[in-house]
Amino acid sequence: MEAEVHILFSSDYYEICDFKCLCNECTKSKTEYNEHLSLCITRLGNFYYNAFRGSLDTYTGSVLISKPGYDYTVTHPGEIPDECTIIIFKKIFYEDIAGQLQLNAHWFFSNKDIQSLLLKTSPQLEQLHYSLLQAARHRSPGKLEMDSIVMEILEDVLSRFTNYEMPEALPARLKKHHLVTIEKAKQYLSEKLSKNISLEELAKHCCISPFHFSRIYKTFTGYSVYQYLQLMRLKHAEMLLGTALPVADIAFQSGFNSIDYFSAAFKKQYKLSPSAFRASRKKTAGFLK
């Protein structure tokens, strides 16, 4: 299986890789051995990750977590090559979290019959992923900034191991006809986060009727378009509250055209006003020092 793999960022504990498959027909890869704990966030395309006794159907909106020590293969069901962001955690980091989280007692890490799990991304995780790519691709990011985003992504993933449920499989026909639609929509929402986006505008961009678009978007993501964008904007605002930007600027940069509405929406989601949230974050940072 042919692929382009570029390391976007590397630290002492992990590497962020941009993976682009170059296959132009349905193929199955050779058996490979996974040596590291990794998170694979699918941006485009569709593939099956085959490991041990299971096969996981991955496409946009899914994150694949794999633990070290297992063989695997990859199968492509369609003609569109996949593109993924893969966060590979180095052995020293895996050993560290094994001690911190008592992984030997954790159902996923201790069960030798499970090599990998598939999780659905949330709008917040999608926003973290987009911010990670923007930082790695378009400027020279600070190490602490990248570490912070990667750790938040990992914590988000690990937190959903409690009460874990396998994502419901989507019909192959639905993926064939509308996977690209959802990919285009997510990219548009990420790039136009601060703009006043209408359903008509978004559906037109995806070449589909607004009514049909609304239905398939919720089928793929579990959220209405409005809910999805609102949670992305609030996550973006949360990240900016760690900077020195005034709250008003953060509201407008996150797509809110009213400071009062932003404050109310933020408090509803985080149980604190933006100013109180910023103060609590500064207090926690000072305590950690």
Image: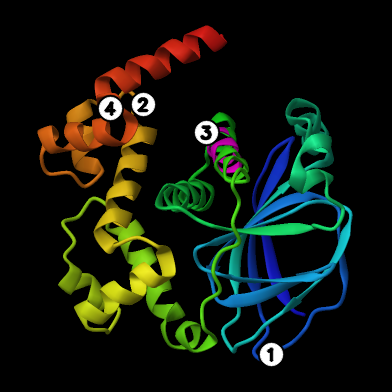
Q: Residue at x 51, y 47 (%)?
A: 132
Check disc 2 and give the amino acid type. Thr
Q: Residue at x 55, y 76 (%)?
A: 45
Q: Look at the image and give the residue range highlighted in magenta.
A: 148-154
Check disc 3 and give the amino acid type. Glu
> Of marks 2 and 3, which one's residue comes earlier in the chain?
3
Height in image: 16 above or below 224? Answer: above
In the drawing, what numbered circle is on residue 245?
4
> Of marks 1 and 3, which one's residue comes earlier in the chain?
1
Q: State yes or no: discs 1 and 4 in contact (Cβ < 8 Å).
A: no
The answer to which quarter of the image holds residue 109 is top right
Looking at the rendered image, the disc whose residue lies closer to the viewer, 1 or 2, is 1
For the residues labelled 1 and 3, the Cα–Cα distance comes to 39 Å
Q: Residue at x 17, y 30 (%)?
A: 248
Question: If the image is split into quadrants, where does the C terminus sit?
Answer: top right
For the residues labelled 2 and 4, the Cα–Cα distance comes to 6 Å
Q: State yes or no: discs 2 and 3 in contact (Cβ < 8 Å).
A: no
Question: If the image is split into quadrants, where does the N terminus sit?
Answer: bottom right
Residue that mark 3 sits on:
145
Looking at the rendered image, the disc whose residue lies closer to the viewer, 1 or 4, is 1
For the residues labelled 2 and 3, the Cα–Cα distance comes to 11 Å
Q: Secondary structure under badge 2?
A: loop
For the residues labelled 1 and 4, the Cα–Cα distance comes to 49 Å
Residue that mark 2 sits on:
243
Q: State yes or no: discs 2 and 4 in contact (Cβ < 8 Å).
A: yes
Check disc 1 and give the amino acid type. Cys
**Magenta portion: prevailing SS class:** helix
